[in-house]
Amino acid sequence: MSSKQRIVVGLSGGVDSAVTAYLLKQQGHEVVGIFMKNWEDDDDDEYCSSRQDFLDAASVADVLGIEIEHVNFAAEYKDRVFAEFLREYQAGRTPNPDVLCNAEIKFKAFLDHAMRLGAEKIATGHYARVRFNEATQRHELLKGLDPAKDQSYFLHRLSQAQLAKTLFPVGELRKTEVRRIADEIGLPNAKKKDSTGICFIGERPFREFLNRYLANQPGVIEDERGRRIGEHVGLSFYTLGQRQGLGIGGLKERHLKRGANGVARGGGDHAPWFVARKDLERNVLVAVQGHDHPLLLSHALHADDASWVAGEAPGAARIAAKTRYRQADSACELAPGANGVFSLRFDEPQWAVTPGQSAVLYDGEVCLGGGVIASAAA
C-alpha cells in the first residue's frame, strides 16, 4: 500500500487507535477519525462514560491535526448486538458480545459509513494483521505480533470483503512499543489504562446490570450427586467455570463425594466450588468442588453458526483452537459438517467449555474462523 489513500480510523479514545492514526498519517495518508457511540443508556455514570472517551479521542485528533466525527451507532448496536446478547443469556448460554460487535458494528455499520465518506480503507487499533496470499488470492487474518495482546479471536467473523478494506497498523507492534510511541509524540492519552469489559457494562457489577433486563427465576444449586448445596438467583446470571458469587463456600466435608482412597474427589475439604452445568429443564445449577473436577473438562465440542475467513469451510484437518480468549491454542481435530456446523476433538481436555462462547480455529498464526459453541462432551 504505497499510494496515498483516504483512511478512516475508528478513534476510541484509547492509546491503540490513537497510535494507529499517527502511524497512517506518518505514511502520508489522508486520515479522518471517527468516534463511535454504541451505547446510550446510562452511559454517563461512573462505569461507562463515552463522553470522556470522546474528549480523549478529540484531544488526540487535535494533536495529530486530523478531523474527527462523532457518529451514533446506538440503534444498530441495540438491534444487532445487545438484543442477541440478551437472547443468549435468556437461553442459558454465555455470549461474547465483542465478537458480534466487531462483525456487526465496527466492520459493518462503521465500514459502510466510512465508505460513504469516500474512504478507501478503514483502520482500527486491534492487535491483529491482514495479509494477502498471492497463491490463494485471498486475504488472511493473522494474529497480532504481541502474543499477550493478540485480538484475532474477536475478529474471526470478518469476511474477505471486510478484510480487503481493513488495516491494523498496531498489529505489527508490541504494546510496549505503542505506549512508547504515544509518549514520544506527546499524545494526551499515552498513559490511559486499557479499557476492560464490554462497552455497555464497563466495570459495573455484571449481575446488577443483567438484573435490569432479565427476569430472574431462583432455584437450587446441587452437587454432582444431586444433593442440595445452596440456591441460585437465576441460571442466566452464572457461567460455566464461575467460582465467585455462588454462596456455598465453607460447606463441610460430609457433602463431598469420596474416592476409593477416602479423599474427596476434585479437591480437599476446603477446595473451591465451580459452576459445572446448567439444567434448564429443572432450573438447577450444578456445582462441583476442585478446579480439575471431571465435569469441568471436555475433550470435544460441537459448534454452529460458523464463519470462515476464507469464505468457505476448511476440510477435515489437524489444527489448533481456542474456546475462550485468554487461552493458549490447543491441538485438535476439525470435523466440518453441513450448514455451518463443525466438531472439534482436542488432544488434551479443555476446561469449562461454555455454550455461547466462540471456538476459534488457527493454522499457526493464521486465524481460519470459528463458530458458536453449542455443546461440549467428555
Image (cartoon, rainbow, N blue to C red):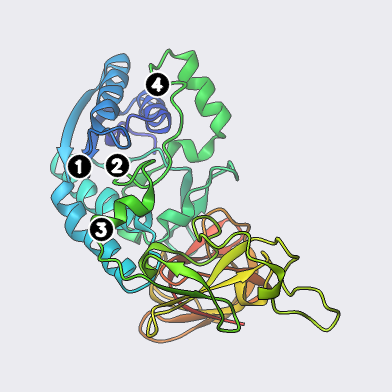
Mark 1 → mark 4, Cα distance in angstroms: 24 Å
Q: Which quarter of the rendered picture does the N terminus lie within?
A: top left
| Residue kind at label 2, given as amino acid type | Ile
Image quadrant in which you'd find residue 175: top right
Q: Are marks 3 and 2 in contact (CB under 8 Å)?
A: no
| Residue kind at label 4, given as amino acid type | Asn
Front position in the image: 218 or 76:
218
**Which residue is identified by label 2?**
122
Q: Earlier in the sequence, mark 3 or mark 2?
A: 3
Q: Earlier in the sequence, mark 1 or mark 4?
A: 1
Q: Residue furthest right?
A: 261
- At a point 60% along the width and 64% down the height, the residue shown is 273
**Which residue is identified by label 1?**
114
Instruction: Look at discs 4 and 2 and give the one toward the viewer.
Output: 4
Quick one: SS at disc 1? helix
**Which residue is identified by label 4?**
189
Quick one: SS at disc 2? strand
Q: Earlier in the sequence, mark 1 or mark 2?
A: 1
Instruction: Look at discs 3 and 2 and give the one toward the viewer.
Output: 3
| Residue kind at label 1, given as amino acid type | Ala
Q: Are marks 1 and 2 in contact (CB under 8 Å)?
A: yes
Q: Residues within 10 Å of mark 4 (few under 14, many from 20)?
A: many
Badge number at residue 81: 3
In the rendered structure, the answer to whether residue 85 lies left or right of residue 135 reads: left
